[in-house]
Image (cartoon, coloured by chain):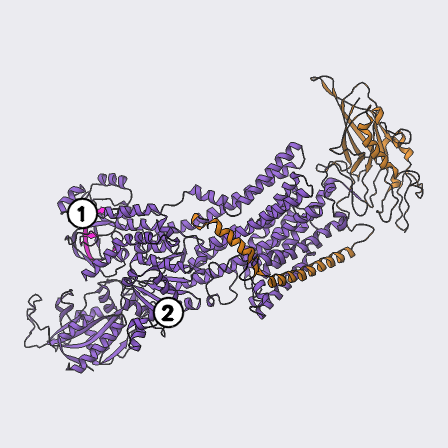
Amino acid sequence: LFQKRADIYSVEIHGSKDLEKVDKGDEKENYKDLKGNRKKSKKQDDLRKELDLDDHKLSNEELEEKYSTSITKGLTSAKAAEILARDGPNALTPPKSTPEIIKFLKQMVGGFSLLLWAGALLCWIAFGIQFAQGVPSARDNLYLGIVLALVVILTGIFAYYQEAKSTNIMASFSKMIPQQALVLRNAEKKEISAEELVVGDIVEVKGGDRIPADIRIIFSQGCKVDNSSLTGESEPQSRSCEFTHDNPLETKNVAFYSTTCLEGTATGIVINTGDNTIIGRIASLASGVGNEKTPIALEIEHFVHIVAGVAISIVVLFFVIAVSMHYAVLDSIIFLIGIIVANVPEGLLATVTVSLSLTAKRMSKKNCLVKNLEAVETLGSTSIICSDKTGTLTQNRMTVAHLWFDNQIFSADTSEDQECQTFDQSSGTWSALSKIVTLCNRAEFRPGQEDTPIMKRIVVGDASETALLKFSEVILNDVMGVRTRNKKVTEIPFNSTNKFQLSIHETDDPNDKRFLLVMKGAPERILERCSTIMINGKEEPLDKERAEAFQTAYMEMGGLGERVLGFCHLYLPEDEFPDTYPFDTDSMNFPTSNLCFVGLLSMIDPPRSTVPDAVSKCRSAGIKVIMVTGDHPITAKAIAKSVGIISATSETVEDIAKRLNIPVEQVNKRDAKAAVVNGMELKDMTLEQLDDILANHSEIVFARTSPQQKLIIVEGCQRQDAVVAVTGDGVNDSPALKKADIGIAMGIAGSDAAKNAADMILLDDNFASIVTGVEEGRLIFDNLKKTIAYTLTKNIAELCPFLIYIIASIPLPIGTITILFIDLGTDIIPSVALAYEKAERDIMNRKPRHKKKDRLVNEQLAVYSYLQIGLLQSLGAFLAYFTVYAEQGFLPYTLLNIRTRWEDHSNNDLEDSYGQEWTMYQRTYLQWNGYTAFFVSITIQQVADLIIRKTRRNSIFQQGLFRNKVIWVGIFSQIAIALILCYGLGSVAALNFTPLRFQYWFVAMPYAILIWVYDEFRKLFIRQYPGSWWDKNMYY
Amino acid sequence: MSKEEKKPFRETVAGWRRFCYNPRSGEIMGRTAKSWGLILLFYAVFYGFLAALFTFTMWVMLQTLSDDIPKYRDRISSPGLMISPKPDTALEFSFNKSDNSSYQVYVDVLKNFLTSYGDSKQSRNINCASGRFFEQNEVADKQACRFNLSNLGPCSGQEDDSFGYSKGTPCVIVKMNRIIGLKPEGNPYINCKTKVKVLASLFDQKTDQAQLTYFPPGGTIDLMYFPYYGKKLHANYLQPLVAVQLAANSSNTKDDVTIECKIEGSPNLRNHDDRDKFLGRIAFKFQISE
């Protein structure tokens, strides 16, 4: 056992070296993240150097001297405060974050901000020129510039605030469980926050505590620690004050920060705190792993590029057109401003943020706490989940799974909330077995838990004994009572040399004065000591046939990856062992052979009951679930099979070889769907071999893997262009969590380092929560598509006025300010409302989107929004515009080429189509009236747009017009805002709105209806002719 | 984008070239010729339909309109004032009375403007009863009232070819914007105020009044020219004019004379609006040099 452990540690320590080797060996793109980070190798040097810790070799006195402390009195408060000031608090520094101001400035220049800044700048330039020329309306440009700058700043602040908020969620989360430590200071024991611990403090830990710092044990009593968060090895290890190994990681007298003390008590001197602890140093390794851009961030970047590209090309094109049409440069600049403002969906990025945070909120209600907003969607595009086994897929507690007695294997209920066991309990053998299970067990329930369900009660004892205790409590309901009635006379606890545990009891039958010897242990050892076997309650000789039956059962249970224990008993004859017989465990003055074998019990950490369903959901959603565990291959495979990671019908290469009875080498690897890869094999693999495995097997289990290998596996998956989700809980997982496209940490079992590195935290540690996350992620991706399509559409309706204005020289149909009122006013709530849209069809039944092919904004979406619906909208709005002008006297043909005369401030007798003459202000007011009509028409048509965007392929009637109530809130808000702007603020000249005749609200209505009808036809054809030309070009 | 993602330049160019024309799949800009054909055909049909639709809806909208009068006239409830000639920029007249090329442009404009008031043009116009509205709601063929150029006195151009510009006594014709159906109440007339900035010396600035003469006398606007029935029904309509002549002011040269004319005497013709500086009023400036 010791040998094995040493092996694992060496993987751990030299693991970092492995990585470097790979870096050098493979200079290609795949490892740029690691390669690019020189700082990290320095950190590794640090790590290796400081591992030359010699505290474990020192005697207590030397330690006292080194840390100027006293084992009996501890540090003085003053001294402690001094050291605390020097070393800082005993906590892991969270990964260095970007300074707030940089984050803020990033928001100010990200996305469309640069375009808008350019617009604002142009405004101010135009203002400067016009002001110098004394143009009376020069100030309009100044204000517009200020408004644009404000828009950028406000949306920037909003995005920054959103980001900060999600970070705060995290901060509050990690503060939820303040850790306490029992420390000796000023010769007094007191509880202080673990953060205040300093080097030299004397601390006491007991079973159940987390080790508050790296400590050198100076006194211990049956102390066992769980180093799994450090090494991934879940076998409890004992800790004592003896120096047993040169390597500080392996010596028994050092316990490490953030590992858990399972049982016993220990006292130790704090030798390292905070970031200097071993865990702290591993955790800081994780910060060296680059953070990948989230898929949604890439998508938004792509989308911004598209929109900015369109904007810039239109701007350039029309600048050229304007100049070649002999417009003054100043006028051309003013056109540019309009084109930029019309083209940029100012409110969209804020809307996306809000939609994401709404989803994040919804997810946190379902126990997925999202740290990084963008990670909300990442989970949706996930194509591979690398899941940890313990705690995520399994319940993280041993439970009795199978029993073997009377030559028969019985299955026990392993679900989380078992209340009774249903296997056949009538046999006499069972009553004997249950007695042994109950009596030969040192585990006990903590008192005062009578009301808690059995499976949730806290037990003092190791994992197997706990499992047995709970198992028998479920069946007998009164384990403690049985134990008191069968008073324990003596016992020999389990130890690794004997490999058995034994105890001797009085019987509860007052007429039976015999003692009962009960024993449990490794099955083969137990069988060796038996001469008889109990069948149906009767002792029968243990002949060869029965021994073989035992072997078969043992192998079968072992093959399920379960830990098997054998049970036997013996009633000591009354004459030889009277009441007063002095049992002595040292001399073993009682028989320990020729016992009666009763049965076998096997235990496993059973899968959570929700997991198989969740795995099959993942599978139907096209997500590959890979198990990566530090556990044994057999156990891993068994769990994988029971949860469906390896499906019932698929075989590994080894299985095929076994079935066909041929050597493993002869098996065609392509025949095997499943693969179980051992960490040792993985170590010798080239990257190509790993890629081959990842690409060609659909069901993969990696067993006995080290944290570094986990990282390599993640990178392998990413080379397949997969979006990889990694679940993990230990510090050792944090590099992989960070490397993954989305790292998912366990909220209950997870260490702080893992939570820091992760993008998402599963509050209930339940794999099934990931599936809901995936669902939400996919939904939000679809809904963002709808939001963006909705928002982009009206950009054309805002842009066309400027283009027609330049080309046909008509009075400007819509003002820049008015556009801003659409983008940041009427459209905001509806576009957020689309985030509440339900899925159109079962999104969990389709493949995850391909990172590079299925874009958020694809050609179809842009073309359909811009060139079809957008154009329809423009026509509707223009109809309203022409109607307003015509009904006031300016017929459409009069408007053509009227621009110079229209905008001439000194021209105050412009004649309309009916011979009336207009002053400049009267015209301007009419122009604003036109703006308002245009605005109202866009708003009305956006209502239609909103309704058609509810679905991308289903008919609105299939989706239900009223199922998403928020859409209606959106529609009403849209109309209400428009009404307020029109009639409420119509008198504020600066806003360029005027009250509008009521009938103009309906002018664009036919177009709105047409938009809806046309889109229904589009969807109908898409549904009717999947794969057709229409489907390919019209489905976005 | 991070640095690592930057591809070598050659690769980028090759990528673009492949995008422009991909010899392997025969794709031009990401589509094959057939695919381009189909999509263009689709858009031709689609846009053809949209064009037809838009034309149709516009036609329907225009059908609802009358040819004679606009549907609504609420945006121009009160007329603006305007002058002729109109300087190009900012209503500032600037000329040298001894240099006829400096004012020729104004004279030409005025002449041109007044041609439509010439007797030959007004042959079909009738003489109306002065002082009351000339209503002809029931009449299909609407008559226009004659406006005799002689009303404008020296500013009619009949006696003085240069409209007084050569003498430093320039004429400006003030007119009220045409508005269909407008009936001024009371007895409207044009009244102007002048402000002269005398540059006697740098420190001694004072404002003075300049003398103005109105034609017709008192700047009256006769009600018989109202109401107006629109371009189509009232084809020969001539709006009443008022000429304003700046009196000679020989003592001061290089004076800035600002003239603000307002329509007065009619309660329903507004002449003061904060935002509209031309509603019932107009301000212009003369800078006459010798």
Q: Is residue A579 shown left or right of residue B153?
A: left
Quadrant in the picture for the N terminus of chain A? bottom left
Q: Does the CB distance between marks 2 and 1 fall below 8 Å?
A: no
Q: Which residues are magenta?
A: A247-271
Quadrant in the picture for the C terminus of chain A? bottom right
Residues at marks 2 and 1 on the same chain: yes
Q: Residue furthest front?
A: B23
Chain B image colour: orange
Q: Is residue B14 above or below residue A613?
A: above
Q: Is residue A209 shown left or right of residue A889?
A: left
Nearer to us in this view, A1009 or A302: A302
* Quarter of the image where one finds residue A639: bottom left
Residue A1009 x %, y %: 66, 61
Which residue carries the number 2 mark? A612
Which chain is home to disc 1? Answer: A
- Circle 2 crowding by C-alpha within 10 Å: few under 14, some 14–19, many from 20: many
Q: Is residue A1024 shown left or right of residue A758?
A: right
Which residue carries the number 1 mark? A55
Name the amino acid, label 2: Pro
Q: Is residue A34 shown left or right of residue B50?
A: left
Using the rendered image of the protein, determine whether residue B265 is visible from the camera's viewpoint: no
